[in-house]
Amino acid sequence: MTVDEQAWGRVLVLHARIEQELAKALQRRHGLGLSEYRALGKLVAGPRGGLRMQELAEAIGLNQSSVSRMCARLEDAGLTIRDLCEDDRRGVYSVITDAGRKRYAETEPTYCSVLRTALDKAASDPELAPAVAAVRGA
């Protein structure tokens, strides 16, 4: 195995461990999936609190079909609404609601705390420490 393959393998292990910890904590403490949390974060930061579905899909790394299903769940929970694009009636926006902003604000401290703790834990593993240092140094 090459040095690059070994390094990449460590990054993948680190990613998987962190994602698992984040997903578990967000679901248990807030009833929110990791992709849903990330979508709310992108919408909060988006222009006027919304993004086209395609832009949201690209921003969180999901395909359009998965984002559409996720947005339906967020809408059912009252955290987002769908809106038609004024310039192009075929375009659909996902727009965060006040309840969605509140839920994101309540969830963000958990995300940040769990991320920090998981990175600290991984940094104590000699195999993962260089990957953690690279992530934190970026």
Image (cartoon, rainbow, N blue to C red):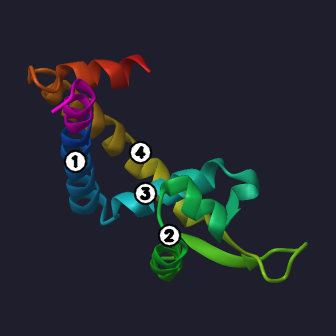
Magenta stretch: helix, strand or loop mostly: helix
Tell me where the magenta segment starts and ends, as one range: 1-10
Locate the N terminus and report the quarter of the image it occupies: top left
What element does badge 4 sit on? helix
Position of the C terminus, as image quadrant, is top left
Q: Is residue 95 visible?
A: no
Instruction: Return the disc, 2 or 1, that comes first in the chain's sequence.
Output: 1
Can you identify the residue that label 2 sits on? 63
Q: Are marks 3 and 4 in contact (CB under 8 Å)?
A: no
Where does label 1 land, which residue? 16
Estimate the spatial distance between the alpha carbons at disc 3 and disc 2, rounded to whole Å: 16 Å
The nearer-to-camera label among 4 and 1 is 1
The secondary element bearing badge 1 is classed as helix
Q: Answer with left or right where residue 62 lies relative to residue 95.
A: left
Foreground disc of the pair 3, 1: 1
Q: Pointer 4: residues within 10 angstroms few (<14), some, or many (20+)? A: some
Three-letter amino acid code at the position of disc 4: Glu
Q: Which residue is mark 3?
A: 37
Query: What residue is drawn where x is 46% and y is 58%?
Result: 103
